[in-house]
Amino acid sequence: MQKLFKASVLFSLLIGLGGCSLTLQKPSPQGQRVDTNIPAGHPSRSYEVVVRYFILDKLGIPQSVDEARADVTHVAVANQGHYYRWGNYQFRSFRLKQNESPVESGMEYDQISSDDHAPWKNLEEVNGFTYFIEQTIVDKQHDGGQIRFLPNLNFVRKNIDGFRFYLQLIDFHMWDIYADFTRDFKQKGDVFQVSEEGHTIRLDEWPNVIRDLNMQGGTIYIESLGNSEFKQQASKLYYFQQNQRLESIIIAPLGKRLALKLPQTGSNRFMGYYETDMEDRVLFARFNEYFHGKIDAPLFINAPNYAKREYILRRVK
């Protein structure tokens, strides 16, 4: 069943501390950025994307927030494919106040009252990046549903900020694929559910950040919540949830040349909703992702690792 492989690419960046072996860090030279020219005279759609990583302590209480935002333009050309341009990609980090109640103000970003006025930084090399995808980023003919057809991202910096851009680019394209699951829905209450047990998808390595990142599928569940309205436009609303298992090797730098290689295993769950227009094109999406895992630390110690990610996408034009 081809569909069951398509949605296994929403996932968090899993970072923790610990260690079991040393490795020598090698420089990761950046390649040349290659852009595609968007043909003139075609209608476009514009989106804003915000992703927030909540860094949690061992009790699961948020301690700090890493945040990234971007604008994305999509131009569809009949009988050709889809053009995309990323702009205004920025990121920042800030800590929560120690005297705040984490339950009242730390669990949801909209309720945080901390001084969150940390300056934004630009990921300069990706701003204005333009590429073409014929259909989707997933190879529908591949038995494993492998992620393919991504633009060449060798020019992106090989650190945590560059890796998060890679994640956001994949996440952005997943909503068209989710729409495939529900095209045959007829009424409120229709359900799509499939198990991905036994299937593994491996994603690209990001040198000096993460290696051997494999996802083992769980269950995808989507339910129609009926017709709605988005900015005075008729729309369709869906609830979804998904779970999967992850394993990877985290690279934790020790100075400029040495780093720890940290095996990590865990599971994550996505819960949220998304909204499409009547032609199944995404208008709005919001989900929370929760990750529970452990890292194999020195002296046979298993270090817990908890993370939360909040994703928001909104069509602005």
Image (tube, grey):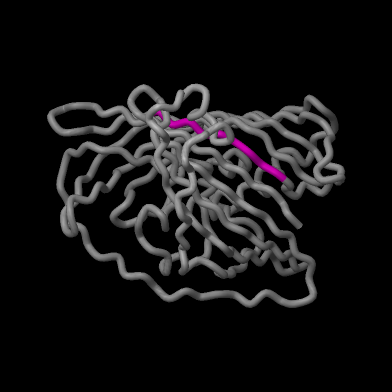
Quarter assignment of residue 99: top left
Residue drawn where x is 61% and y is 43% of the image: 312
| Relative to 271, 314 lies left or right | right
| Location of the C terminus (image quadrant) | bottom right
Give percent across and percent down for residue 193. Answer: 65, 29
| Location of the N terminus (image quadrant) | top right
Q: Magenta span: helix, strand or loop, mainly?
A: strand
Instruction: Examine the rendered structure and indicate whether residue 222 appears above or below residue 125.
Output: above
| Relative to 266, 236 lies left or right | right
Quarter assignment of residue 248: top left
Instruction: Examine the rendered structure and indicate whether residue 85 appears above or below residue 193.
Output: below
Q: Residue furthest left?
A: 299
Indicate yes or no whether the magenta region holds residue 75: no
Give percent across and percent down for residue 137. Answer: 58, 56
**Tag count:** 0
Residue drawn where x is 51% and y is 75% of the image: 34
Q: Taking the image as drawn, is residue 69 in sight?
A: yes
Instruction: Examine the rendered structure and indicate whether residue 266 appears above or below residue 81.
Output: above
Q: Taking the image as drawn, is residue 197 in sight?
A: no
Q: Nearer the viewer, residue 283 or 261?
A: 283
**Boundaries of the magenta span:** 284-292
Residue drawn where x is 48% and y is 56% of the image: 120
Give percent across and percent down for residue 29. Answer: 31, 70
